[in-house]
Amino acid sequence: MYPETTALNQYRFAAFEIPATGGSHQHLIWGHGWGQSSAAFMPLAETLKPFASSTMIDFPGFGQSSLPPASWGTADYADAVAQWLQSQSRSQLIWIGHSFGGRVGIQLAARYPQLPAGMVLIASAGLPRKRTPLQRIHFSLRRTFFKTAKRFLREGPQLERLRQRMGSADYRSAGALRPVFNRVVSEDLTDVARKVRCPTLLIYGKEDTETPPEMGQRLKELIPRAELMILDGFGHLNILNEGRHQVALQIRKFLQSLPQ
C-alpha cells in the first residue's frame, strides 16, 4: 500500500487509505504513538473496514512524512493535521489516537471543534504522571543531575553516552526529534482537555504502566462527553494488536452511538 503524500508548507505529509468494504458515511483518521507510524494501526483498521473507511497518517518526523520545520509541540501537530483535513472532502470524521496521537487529538478537538464528530483515545497521554513522593524525588534528582552534567560537556561522544544512560527509551531513539520530544512530554493538556466538546471514548489497558488507567479516569473527568473503558490483560502497546478485537468492538459501538 502506497501513501498519498501532500506538501504542506515546509514538509511532506504521508497518509494511507483503507476503503470501507461496506457502505458508511463515517471516516476514521488514525494518529499513531511516539516512535511509531501508521503501520501500528493496520490490524485495527483492517478489522474495522467493513464498518468505516480509514486514513492512517504518518505525523511529520515519523514513517514516510518529512521532519517538521521546527521544534513542534502538540498544538503544531494538531494545526498541521487540521490543515490537511480541511483539504479533504469527507463526511463524518472520527479521530482515533494512540498515546502521542491522543495528545494531538485532544489539541485537534479543542482547537478545531468543527472537524471531529467524535474521538477515540487509546492509551492516550497528555496529563502529568502521578508519582509517589519517593518517585518524585528520584525523578527530580535524575533531571537535575542530567541538566547540570550537560553544562560541562560539549556536544560529542561523552554527552551522547550521558543521554543514552539517563534518557528514556523514547528519548534515546528520538534522534533529530529530541527537541520535539522534550517539548511534547513536558506539556500538561489539562486545560486543553476541558475544551473538548465532541463525544469521546477513552480506552486503556489495565496493565498499562506508561499511560495507566488512572490517567484515563482523569481525562474522563475533564472531557464533558467522555466514556472510559478499561480492558483487562493489556498494556500500552499490545492493546493495538493482541487487544485489537476488543478495541474494535468498543469502537464499533461508539460509532453506532454517534448522531447519523
Image (spheres, rainbow, N blue to C red):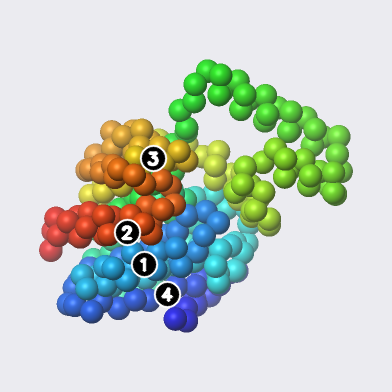
Residue 71 lies left or right of residue 37; in this view the side is: right
Q: Residue furthest top?
A: 133
Nearer the observer, 14 or 156: 156
Closer to us: mark 4 or mark 1?
1
Front residue of 231 and 77: 231
Residue 231 picture location, percent across and down: 29, 45
Query: Where is residue 257 shown, x and y percent of the image?
Result: 14, 55
Tell me the CA gap for discs 1 and 3.
21 Å
Mark 2 highlights which residue? Answer: 244
**Mark found first going from the N terminus, 3 or 2:** 3
Residue 162 location, quadrant? top right
Q: Are marks 2 and 1 in contact (CB under 8 Å)?
A: yes
Crowding near the residue tagged with mark 1, few <14, some 14–19, many ≥20 C-alpha atoms within 10 Å: some
Which circle marks residue 29 in the picture?
Answer: none
State the separation of the CA atoms marked 3 and 4: 30 Å
Amino acid of disc 1: Pro
Q: First in sequence: mark 2 or mark 1?
A: 1
Residue ID for mark 1: 43
Quarter of the image that includes the C terminus: bottom left
* Residue at disc 3, secondary structure: loop
Check disc 2 and give the amino acid type.
Answer: Arg
Question: In what element is the residue under mark 4?
Answer: strand
Label 3, on which residue?
207
Q: Which element type, helix, strand or loop, lies under badge 2?
A: helix
For the residue marked with disc 3, what is the amino acid? Glu
Residue drawn at x 68%, y 55% as measured from the top left? 175
Badge 2: residue crowd in 10 Å (few <14, some 14–19, many ≥20): some
SS under mark 1:
helix
Q: Is residue 83 above or below residue 207?
A: below
Q: Is residue 72 visible?
A: yes
Residue identifier under label 4: 16
